[in-house]
């Protein structure tokens, strides 16, 4: 949030890293690249203070699914100020048709594989809110990591089908929305959507 002073944001991330948090997730679309700048500054500071870069998994996204990967990664690495990210995931793959385009010969998945070979990315993957897309990715076998929601407000298939299959295939998983996009923590309908009125009822 740009309303919070930059130094406070970075200091908060640094405290988290110093306390043992080892996964930082960002994307170009998060605050129009500002999130990447904050994450990069915090990681660089952590390493400069003696922390080990290999102890932090930096996750970034490829936001535009139908555009070339390399220029998007160029821009992200420049904002991060890092030579590489640990995981680059295609962001919010919503439909099977989008997955099929990414998985096609010469498509985004192949392009991201080239970035792995170049050393600018360690692992490739996708994030998705569709169990069928995730199942197709598991069938394909080229994703190192899958990102998907787990919690009270999403389909049980993520837990009963996707997670066991990923584990069996030795595919990494990062689960999000565990607090229901904030619904379990406060008076909200989801990210950036406060309730118009607080529900009242018997406790």
Image (cartoon, rainbow, N blue to C red):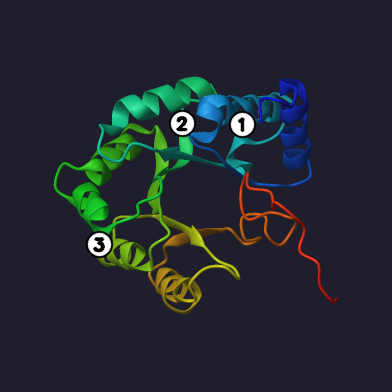
**Residue matched to label 1:** 39
**SS for dot 3:** helix
Disc on the earlier residue, 1 or 3:
1
Q: Residue at x 61, y 53 (%)?
A: 190
x and y percentages locating residue 132 in the rendered image: 32, 67
x and y percentages locating residue 20 in the rendered image: 74, 47
Q: Which residue is situated farthest in the right direction here?
A: 203
Which is in the foreground here, disc 2 or disc 1? 1
**Residue matched to label 2:** 84
Quadrant location of the C terminus?
bottom right
Q: Residue at x 39, y 38 (%)?
A: 63
Q: Does 74 sit above or below residue 12? A: above
Left or right, 51 with reference to 169: right
**SS for dot 1:** helix
**SS for dot 2:** loop
Q: Dot 1, how many residues are within 10 Å of its Cα: few (below 14), some (14-19), or many (20+)?
A: many
Q: Dot 2, how many residues are within 10 Å of its Cα: few (below 14), some (14-19), or many (20+)?
A: many
**Residue matched to label 3:** 140
Q: Nearer the viewer, residue 200 or 13?
A: 200
Q: Residue at x 72, y 35 (%)?
A: 13
Disc on the earlier residue, 2 or 3:
2
- How far is the residue under mark 2 from the one under mark 3? 25 Å
Quadrant location of the N terminus?
top right
Left or right, 62 with reference to 58: left
Q: Dot 3, how many residues are within 10 Å of its Cα: few (below 14), some (14-19), or many (20+)?
A: few
x and y percentages locating residue 191 in the rendered image: 61, 48
Q: Are marks 2 and 1 in contact (CB under 8 Å)?
A: no
Left or right, 133 with reference to 105: right
Left or right, 132 with reference to 128: left
């Amino acid at each position: 949030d740009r309303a919070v002073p930059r130094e406070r944001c970075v200091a908060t991330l640094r405290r988290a890293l110093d306390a043992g948090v080892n996964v930082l997730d960002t994307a170009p679309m998060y605050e129009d690249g500002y999130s990447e700048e904050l994450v990069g500054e915090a990681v660089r500071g952590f390493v400069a203070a003696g922390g080990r870069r290999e102890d932090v998994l930096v996750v970034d996204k490829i936001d535009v699914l139908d555009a070339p990967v390399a220029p998007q990664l160029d821009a992200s690495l420049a904002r991060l100020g890092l030579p590489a990210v640990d995981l680059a995931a295609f962001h919010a793959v919503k439909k099977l048709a989008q997955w099929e385009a990414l998985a096609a010969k010469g498509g985004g998945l192949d392009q991201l594989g080239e970035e792995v070979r170049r050393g600018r990315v360690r692992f490739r993957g996708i994030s998705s809110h569709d169990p069928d897309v995730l199942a197709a990715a598991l069938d394909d076998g080229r994703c190192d990591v899958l990102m998907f929601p787990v919690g009270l407000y999403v389909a049980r298939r993520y837990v009963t089908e996707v997670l066991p299959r990923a584990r069996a295939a030795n595919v990494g998983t990062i689960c999000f929305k565990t607090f229901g996009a904030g619904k379990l923590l406060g008076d909200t309908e989801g990210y950036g959507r406060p309730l118009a009125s607080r529900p009242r009822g018997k406790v």
